[in-house]
Amino acid sequence: MGLLDKLRGTEKAPPPKTVVAAAVPMNGPGVRSVNRGRMYKTTELWQNEAWYYYDAIGEVRGPITWIANAASQADIHATELDPETGKPTGPTDNPVAVAAAALVLGGAAQRSGLLRLISLCWQVPGEAWIIVRPTRAKEPDKWLVLSGNKVTAKGESWQYTDPFTAETVVLTPQDRLLRVWQPHPNDQAKADSAMRPALPVCRECEKASQSIAATLDSRIGMNGAWLVPEEADLPRGDHETAGAALMDLMLTMMETSLQNPGQAAGRVPLVVTMPGEVIGNAVFQDFATAFDAAVVELRDNALSRLASALDMPKDVAEGTQGESNHWSAWQVEESTYKIFIEPLLKAVGDAITEHWFRPALIAMGMDPGQAAGYEIGWDTTAIVARPDDRETLESLYEKILISDEYMLTENGVTTDAMPSKEERTRRLLEKWVSGAPTLLADPNITQGMDLGLEISPVAAGVDAEVGAGGELVTPEPEPAPNALPGATPDTRGEEPVPEGLVAAAELIVYDALSRAGGRLLTNQNRGQFKSTPRHELHTVIPLPHGTFELMEGSFQFTDPVAEAFAVRPSRLKVALENYVAGLLLERRPHNRERLREALR
């Protein structure tokens, strides 16, 4: 059975609930009277007229459809609320909440189309009706979105006209009926929309267009009058006057030209003979008036007023948003979402959360108190465009403040194009070696670069000498003088590691772990680990990618530390990199004794 059936169990099902506000069910004091006031008349006259002009005027339909198409791109996710502030913290990974959110508005296959219908109803009549009906066993609930004229009351129950079969369906107590609408400020039980005050302007636009069409039709039927003297010499045939004979001749020529378009006969002039003294009396009378020339201007003025009246930016209503530059176009889209689309999504999300989503969570076994901590959230990345801030993105990326995935997404590249872990490691090593060729003397570097051969230290720019067997031997560097009191060289790894070196290396480790923790924080998990220090976030957040990406930019202070304690810089850096990588992979916190062992 559907989720609503599971919720109701074996007890007697309550009557279907009609929501007259985004979060108010159809029961309780003061609500029944509102229900009775709307029950027998779900659509007002102005709403029917608004639908008429949506169908009749393209300048109304175009921008309203543009807004609806934009709203349909929003995606749904389950979000967890912060218990202290009550604000959403981003998408949750709770499997029950995720599974329930996936069924909202008919699931991914139907959600976009239903959101589009809701947006159209929100903008034209100002209200949309959402119907949720349980289906057969183990099948998800059926979702429908209808306009008000398709939902009517029948006694104490409600019925609707099925949009696919045109049949009348009576709602049962197991069904849910939700009403999402823009309340009129004077009578909040009634719907309101920007189309309501725009109706007089729509009438002007329609009448102006009809006047223009009538003028064109009149020119086809009678394009003025030609006053012909009676002395004109024309074959009159059965006609009593020369004018009637001329008209018959002209119609015959017009029919021939229309029946055979493109023929020379259509370009041959009509020849009429008459006495020279009366030729000047042949007059053409034009029936056009000054209003005919002004009606186009009147219609343009009405369309401009209509664009100002609709609930959207004027350039969107006029269809000129594509003519602006990239930056201003982004501002239009951003303001369009915040002012015109977000209220719609908020109203829909609140209604579904209160009267379907949280009851569904309870039906799926979640505690009611826990279910109250979740709500429906919206992912609007496909709606709200971003400015062309490539230089800013590159700067943030160089400072390691944004992730690789975010950088790719903002530049329109899919994450599938990201290099593999091995390829990224090799390319990073190549970048490092190009700046410091002496790193090729380290076998870990050559192995990581997958060179498949041994690099000669001489070729790498490292001093070397030939050993007894003819092989190249790299001499140990002369120990540098100690920069700190009490520090002793540790060239053989047999003597105890100086405490000063351990302390300095520990700071480098904390820096690397803190950088890795910052990169592990995403919009999805931000705010969930407030009590965990940044350098220990890797112990509670799984690694989404390789350790080299998390450690990039760290260990830049190993050379000064190595010089201070007279150890080889490359060995110290490799030791610290391996130690930190091991902590990240094993999800362990830093331990000073383990670090000391790594430094041996």
Image (spheres, rainbow, N blue to C red):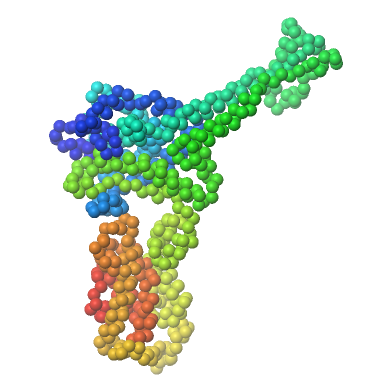
Can residue 234 be spotted in the picture? no
Rendered location of residue 321, percent (x, y): 51, 44
- Residue occupying image coordinates x 23% and y 75%: 591
Can residue 320 be spotted in the picture? yes
Image quadrant in which the N terminus is located: top left
Q: Dividing the picture into quarters, in which one does residue 191 lie?
A: top left
Rendered location of residue 488, percent (x, y): 30, 90
Q: 113 or 314, which lies in front? A: 314
Q: 480 or 53, which lies in front? A: 53
- Residue occupying image coordinates x 21% and y 47%: 371
Total count of labels: 0
Image quadrant in which the C terminus is located: bottom left
Q: Is residue 566 left or right of residue 314?
A: left
Rendered location of residue 123, percent (x, y): 41, 35
- Residue most extreme to the right: 276
Q: Is residue 398 left or right of residue 349?
A: right
Rendered location of residue 222, percent (x, y): 66, 18
- Residue occupying image coordinates x 32% and y 47%: 377
> Where 525 falls versus 227 (above or below)?
below
- Residue occupying image coordinates x 28% and y 62%: 542
Q: Dividing the picture into quarters, in which one does residue 588 lie?
A: bottom left
